[in-house]
């Protein structure tokens, strides 16, 4: 009687092991397709119109980037690009006397 129970547990263990190995192999072989599928679902949930919805094309309505060209913002300035007075760099002073 005890041997039948042990054999049943061994068979169940073998079935579970083969199932785990089979599913791991399936995921390993199809990982690229699975990743692309998930990316597509995420992109569709974030942007219902796809890329055309962002750019303003297609039937998805107005895009998120549509009309950004004419915001009327001034051009950025860089005060460090052209200093008002040219300055001469000072030569470094040595902390040791006699210039060593």
Image: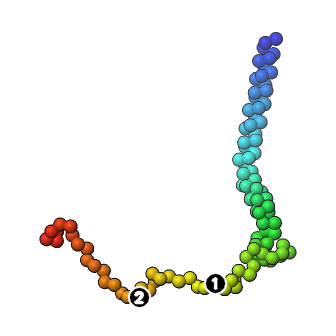
Q: Position of residue 79 (x, y in %)?
A: 47, 83
SS of the residue under disc 2: loop
Mark-to-mark CA distance, 1 and 2: 25 Å
Q: Position of residue 34 (x, y in %)?
A: 75, 53
Residue corresponding to mark 1? 73
Q: Which residue is found at the position 79% from the left and 26% from the top?
A: 12
Taking the image as shown, residue 78 lies to the left or right of residue 89, namely right
Looking at the image, the residue that sits furthest to the left is 98
Query: Which callout, 1 or 2, points at the residue further toward the start of the chain?
Result: 1
Taking the image as shown, residue 72 lies to the left or right of residue 5, namely left
For this rendering, which residue is in front, 54 or 88? 88
Residue corresponding to mark 2? 84
Q: Which residue is found at the position 75% from the left and 79% from the top?
A: 66
Residue 40 in sight in this render? no
Taking the image as shown, residue 80 lies to the left or right of residue 52, namely left
Residue 38 in sight in this render? yes
For this rendering, which residue is in front, 74 or 3? 74
Quarter holding the N terminus is: top right
Taking the image as shown, residue 61 lies to the left or right of residue 74, namely right
Quarter holding the C terminus is: bottom left
Task: Relative to 4, say whether 45 is above or below.
Answer: below
Task: Relative to 25, say whether 77 is above or below.
Answer: below
Give residue 94's quadrant in the image.
Answer: bottom left
Task: Relative to 93, say whether 20 is above or below.
Answer: above
């Amino acid at each position: 009687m005890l041997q039948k129970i042990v054999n049943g547990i061994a068979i169940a263990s073998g079935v579970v092991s083969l199932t785990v190995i089979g599913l791991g192999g399936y995921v390993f072989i199809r990982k690229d397709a699975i990743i692309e599928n998930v990316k597509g679902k995420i992109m569709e949930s974030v942007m219902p119109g796809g890329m055309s919805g962002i750019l303003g094309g297609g039937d998805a309505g107005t895009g998120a980037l549509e009309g950004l060209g004419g915001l009327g913002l001034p051009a950025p300035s860089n005060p460090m690009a052209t200093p008002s007075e040219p300055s001469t760099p000072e030569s470094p002073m040595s902390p040791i006397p006699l210039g060593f």
